[in-house]
Amino acid sequence: MSTKLKLFAVMSLLLPMLIACGGSAPATDGSATNGSATDVSPTTAADSQPASDSASGGAKTYVLVPKNLGNPYFDTANKGAQEAAQELSVTVTYQGSAAADATQQIQLLNSLIAQNVNGLAISANDADALVPVGKSAIDAGIPVVTWDSSIAEGGRTVHINQAVSADIAAIQIKMASELAGGSGKIAILSATSTAPNQNEWIALMQEELKKPEYANLELVETVYGDDQDEKSYTEAQGLMTKYPDLKVIIAPTTVGIAASARAVQDAGKIGTVFVTGLGTPNQMREYVKSGASPQFALWNPADLGYLAIHALHAIASGQIEGKPGDSFSAGRLGQYTIADDGTILLGPPTVFNSDNIDSFDF
Ligand code: RAM
């Protein structure tokens, strides 16, 4: 066995152990390659153990960091990330906090930087608050790819956009208008009030509503369910109580849309209040069929996780720098080029309804 191979074999054995026994540092599931969810109690960087073999040139270890754990959307993204990890012969662990909270996420990221992982793929809970920690990672030689929800420029190497943000906004207003029959009260039930992706889409939805064809739609309020099922359910009930003639709830979050549809169904308001927005087919199938949410949209989260890891690996392994104009191959998804604004675009969203919902399983 060559020295390089021996080193690789030793590190493959040691790496999961180093991560798993990192004191009170975020624990992994031990079998670092399967990437199953780990609920992480964020710790200070000082508690962490180094877990990198970057200096030795062995197999790389990346971390996929969702906004929070326990959300099927992010679990599906992790499936795609694990598929990419297998193809690239790298390790991807999946680590996040229980709540979609920027402070907890920053603590986790500091800990991962101290462990000297080889790259971070993050869905951010706050665009600006995460800039310093993203910058620390980059300064430490750890590339930062954001996906789904971006850290502002300066705190990331590149961002992977799931679809053109204006299109994500436009499709939601179009679906809402169709469900409202072109006029009446609509409300938005979002994730957290600091979520970079939802806040961008909400601002663009407000712009979209200024178009003449939507003049008779009235956006009465935006509320926040924090990507928690129970809070989202209660907020949806609150909207229906406060606005008895509400026609549509738009929830640009997979947690919020499922909770809102359940609230409408439980309130016996199917056919009176409609729910639309962004959801996963498996969580929404029953509500499409009941009529609580006849149509909604999304991209494929597995493809997003898969693309994030391919992009991260292309940067971390030195194939590209991560600058505008750089091109890289993302396996079964083909070739991608980084745009002038430092983003990579996955593709257009899909609208799901009773015609196609049974063809999707995620
Ligand atoms: C939730 C999260 C995620 C968002 C989707 C649509 O799962 O808030 O960030 O992209 O909804």
Image (tube, rainbow, N blue to C red):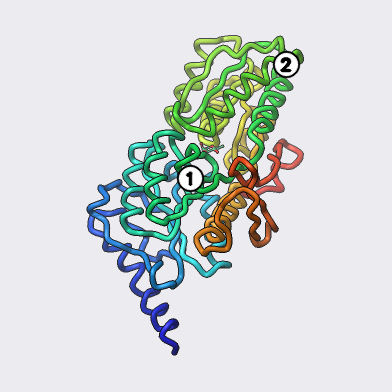
Which disc, if any, is residue 319?
Answer: none
Q: Residue at x 61, y 26 (%)?
A: 275
- Residue under circle 1? 156
Tag 2 near tag 1, CB within 8 Å: no
* Gap in angstroms between the C-alphas marked 2 and 1: 34 Å
Residue underneath mark 2: 211
Q: What is the crowding at mark 2: few (fewer than 14 residues within 10 Å), some, or many (at least 20)? A: few
- At 30% from the left edge and 47% from the top edge, which residue is drawn? 41
Quarter-of-image position of residue 134:
top left
Among numbered discs 2 and 1, the one appearing first in the sequence: 1
In the drawing, does residue 26 fall left or right of residue 202? Answer: left
Mark 1 closeness class: few <14, some 14–19, many ≥20 residues within 10 Å: many
153 and 216: which is toward the camera? 153
Task: Pick the residue in front: 306 or 177.
Answer: 306
Q: Amino acid at mark 1?
A: Arg
Q: Position of residue 333 (x, y in %)?
A: 68, 56
Give percent across and percent down for residue 208.
68, 21
Residue drawn at (68%, 14%) of the image: 210
- When the figure is inspected, residue 338 is found, relative to residue 263, above or below; the finding is below
